Amino acid sequence: MKGRLLTIREVAGLLHVSRSHAYSLMRHSNIPIVRIGSLVRVRPEDLELFIRERSSRNFKKPRVKS
């Protein structure tokens, strides 16, 4: 096993969102979680994948009519 698991506070900080919004992302299965008893953790590679899948290069700009 490599790396360590991220806490909710760390995930929220890395995403620059509130802790409640980070929990919401996890609750709706957008970010996979690891449960250790009542603790919730995120694997760094899962967070990286979440970010990569939503990167701006995947965003299609609307066409502007001339």
Image (cartoon, rainbow, N blue to C red):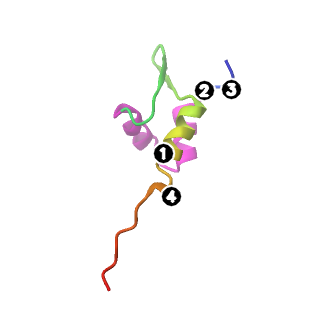
Q: Image point 51% across, 34% down: which residue? A: 8
Q: Is residue 40 above or below residue 18?
A: above
- Residue extending furthest toward the left: 65
- How dense is the environment of label 3, judged by Cα within 10 Å: few (below 14), some, or many (20 and up)? few
Q: Quadrant of the C terminus?
A: bottom left
Q: Of tags 4 and 3, which is closer to the observer?
A: 4
- How dense is the environment of label 4, judged by Cα within 10 Å: few (below 14), some, or many (20 and up)? few
Say whether marks 4 and 1 touch (CB < 8 Å). Answer: no
Question: If you read the primary sequence from the N terminus, does the residue marked by circle 1 or circle 3 appear first?
Answer: 3
What kind of residue is marked 1? Glu
Task: Give amino acid for label 4.
Answer: Arg
**Which residue matches tag 3?**
3
**Residue 3: horizontal and vertical position, in percent?**
68, 26
Q: Which residue is mark 4?
A: 57
Foreground label between 4 and 2: 4
Query: In the rendered structure, are the residues bearing label 3 and label 2 in contact, judged by CB atoms less than 8 Å apart?
Result: yes
Residue position for label 2: 5
Q: Position of residue 22 (x, y in %)?
A: 44, 40
Per the rendered image, the range of residues in magenta is 5-28
